[in-house]
């Protein structure tokens, strides 16, 4: 199999290590705009000179699958070009900048019968899989609310705002955990740096079932741990899922899961907590590279079996693009924004973000 990886930046290096871990270096061609990054890849993994380059097009026609790890605003065009040439594609999140682009890609996937998988790697995390299974088995009872914090001091990305790069991980994860997409969002974002995109964000979501979720993200709040992906950064990546029988709190950075069997009962006119077992299951610890390898393996399995990936292009592309546009519409208007199938589509995110409130 001929694999073409496009993009060898901060996260592209993790993809390269994951391909190496999977024993795929011999099948790999790597493209990046930077000669230095290509040189480093050649040096570290012994990739032949004729298998690296600064232009992707000369490599694209012979590729069977394409792995896109370039900045987010380049994803839509690269995906479309690869799909049109009949390639199966793995693309890092977010799939596109707008819902219009997402729908074009979904239509191209449908027409071409190609595989397109988006890199939401928390779905593959043992913690996420454990929580999903607990919910599926009814262990938590009825889910009431979820909250997530994905934040910490780190460099501000220049392709998209913090909701669109970090918050979106937990928005996607929450959708996966409860098997729904939000019907309404209310968002507060701030652009303290004055870059035209947010560095702080709080998104409240309401799901059709009535479940409520909150995702906080940002570069200006401290994190608890040294970030395992971004150099020189501190991070917090934790979620809480509250059910009427059990609550789970999990910290992805230190692989810690706590389960509380606590419910409230009316006792002498007071709603008081009744405490049951508090447990902390030990789950397999995984590195970011192992997680990328897990999702790339799932992608290659979809390619081999010709089955739709999980998440599919609608879940991980179109629906999330609709949520993101509603986030920016809400932040701009100061009102909750509904997410409907006939969503108001933005041709550019900038038009939604530019008038959002800015605080210093
Ligand atoms: N899943 C995760 O947890 C996670 C973490 C970090 C980044 N990401 C995603 O990965 C993507 C890349 O992020 P990054 O931090 O590596 O960005 P980056 O800016 O560090 O690197 C991007 C690389 O792409 C290269 N590039 C850009 N256009 C190119 C082109 N046309 N042809 C060849 N190379 C090209 C650049 O030279 C650069 O080396 C983003 O979409 C980001 O959202 C995902």
Image (cartoon, grey):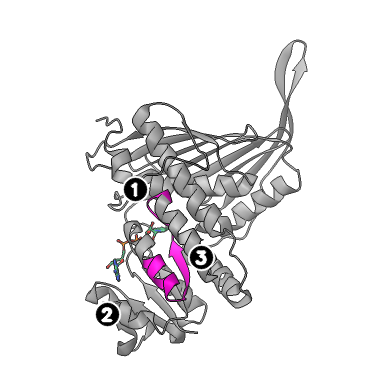
> Quarter of the picture for ligand 1?
bottom left
The percent position of residue 24, horizontal first and vertical second, equals 48, 82
Residue drawn at (34%, 51%), measured in percent from left and top?
A: 233
Q: Position of residue 137 (x, y in %)?
A: 76, 48
Check mark 1 vs ligand 1: CB closer than 8 Å? yes or no: no
Res. 188 in view:
no
For marks 1 and 2 on the same chain, the one whose residue lies earlier in the sequence: 2
SS at badge 1: loop
- Which is more toward the observer, 97 or 359? 97
Q: Earlier in the sequence, mark 1 or mark 3?
A: 3
Q: SS class of the residue under badge 2?
A: helix
Q: How many marks?
A: 3
Q: Residues within 10 Å of mark 2 (few under 14, many from 20)?
A: some
Q: Residue at x 40, y 78 (%)?
A: 4
- Can you name the residue that lies furthest to the top here? 269
- Distance, label 1 to label 3, CA atoms, is 20 Å
Which numbered mark, 3 or 2, is in the foreground of this view?
3
Identify the disc placed on residue 109: 3
Residue found at x 30% / y 53%: 159
Local crowd size for mark 3, using a 10 Å CA cut-off: few (<14), some (14–19), many (≥20)? many
Circle 3: element type: helix
Position of residue 106 relative to residue 273, above or below, is below
User: Where, by quadrant of the figure, is residue 57 drawn?
Assistant: bottom left
- Residue labelled with disc 2: 39
What x and y, as percent, mark residue 63?
43, 81
What is the CA distance from the residue labelled 3 to the residue labelled 2?
34 Å
Please give the label number shown on residue 347: 1
Q: Nearer the viewer, residue 325 or 250?
A: 325
Q: Which residues are magenta?
A: 78-99
Q: Quadrant of the C terminus?
A: top left
């Amino acid at each position: 199999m001929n694999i073409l990886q496009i993009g060898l930046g901060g996260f592209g290096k993790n993809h390269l290590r994951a391909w190496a871990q999977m024993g795929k270096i011999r099948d790999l061609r790597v493209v990046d705009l930077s000669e230095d990054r290509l040189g480093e890849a050649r040096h570290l993994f012994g990739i032949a000179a004729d298998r690296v380059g600064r232009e992707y097009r000369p490599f694209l026609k012979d590729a069977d699958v394409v792995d896109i790890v370039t900045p987010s605003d380049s994803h839509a065009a690269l995906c479309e070009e690869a799909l049109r040439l009949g390639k199966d594609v793995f693309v890092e999140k977010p799939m596109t900048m707008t819902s219009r682009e997402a729908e074009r890609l979904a239509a191209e996937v449908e027409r071409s019968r190609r595989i397109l998988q988006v890199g939401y790697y928390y779905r593959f995390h043992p913690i996420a899989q454990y929580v999903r299974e607990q919910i599926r088995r009814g262990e938590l009872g009825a889910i009431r609310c979820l909250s997530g914090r994905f934040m910490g001091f780190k460099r501000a990305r220049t392709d998209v705002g913090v909701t669109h790069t970090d918050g979106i991980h937990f928005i996607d994860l929450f959708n996966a955990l409860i098997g729904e997409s939000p019907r309404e969002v209310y968002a507060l974002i701030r652009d303290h740096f004055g870059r035209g995109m947010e560095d702080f964000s709080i998104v409240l979501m309401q799901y059709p079932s009535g479940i409520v979720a909150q995702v906080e993200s940002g570069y200006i709040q401290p994190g608890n741990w040294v970030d395992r992906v971004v150099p020189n950064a501190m991070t917090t990546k934790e979620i809480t899922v509250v059910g009427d029988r059990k609550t789970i709190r999990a910290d992805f950075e230190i692989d810690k899961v706590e389960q509380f069997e606590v419910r409230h009962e009316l006792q002498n006119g007071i709603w008081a907590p009744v405490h049951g077992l508090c447990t902390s299951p030990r789950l397999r610890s995984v590195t970011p590279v192992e997680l990328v390898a897990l999702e790339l393996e799932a992608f290659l399995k979809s390619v081999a079996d010709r089955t739709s990936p999980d998440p599919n292009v609608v879940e991980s592309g179109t629906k999330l693009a609709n949520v993101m546009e509603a986030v920016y519409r809400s932040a701009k208007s100061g009102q909750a924004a509904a997410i409907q199938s006939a969503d108001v589509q933005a041709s550019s995110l900038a038009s939604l973000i530019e008038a959002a409130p800015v605080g210093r």
